[in-house]
Amino acid sequence: MRNPKNPLRKLSKLQLLELLAEQEKELQKLRSELAQKEEELKARALILEESGSIAEAAIRINGVFEAAQAAAEQYLYSLHYKLKKSDVNDEVLQSVIDEVKQHEHE
């Protein structure tokens, strides 16, 4: 069954070929745009992946700093405890603690 209302049926072969050529140009343009958008998407995905890696590295570094801080606090506590057990007076004890804390901030 042919559709008599189809407007393409009224076109000549030359007009149909011209229409086909226009459609081919449009298709090529759209394929080019699609390829460009896919490249942009890949670039964004790479940026997001790298951002995730940077964030993960920052979290790991923070963990190292937290462990170092905990170790320093444990050292101070241990030092304080040992000095309290010894015959060292409070003034000497405070001097040692202050010196350790000063080096901690460097």
Image (cartoon, rainbow, N blue to C red):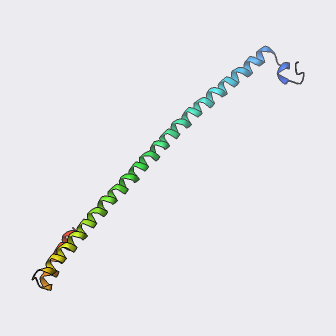
The residue furthest right is 4
Q: Nearer the viewer, residue 79 or 31?
A: 79
Q: Quadrant of residue 104?
A: bottom left
Instruction: Residue 62 in the image: state x and y as whole percent.
Output: 34, 60
Number of on-image labels = 0
From this view, report whether residue 68 is shown above or below residue 96.
above
Instruction: Residue 41 in the image: state x and y as whole percent.
Output: 52, 40
From this view, report whether residue 3 is shown above or below residue 100.
above
Q: Quadrant of residue 86?
A: bottom left
The residue furthest front is 85
The residue furthest left is 87
For the point 43% across and 50% down, which residue is it?
52
Q: Is 82 positioned to the left or the right of 7 in the image?
A: left
Q: Is 50 positioned to the left or the right of 73 in the image?
A: right
Q: Quadrant of residue 91?
A: bottom left
Q: Nearer the viewer, residue 71 or 46?
A: 71
- Mark yes or no: residue 95 visible: no
For the point 14% across and 78% down, which residue is it?
83
Q: Is 59 positioned to the left or the right of 38 in the image?
A: left
Instruction: Residue 31 in the image: state x and y as whole percent.
Output: 60, 29
Where, quadrant-wise, is the C terminus in this rendering?
Answer: bottom left
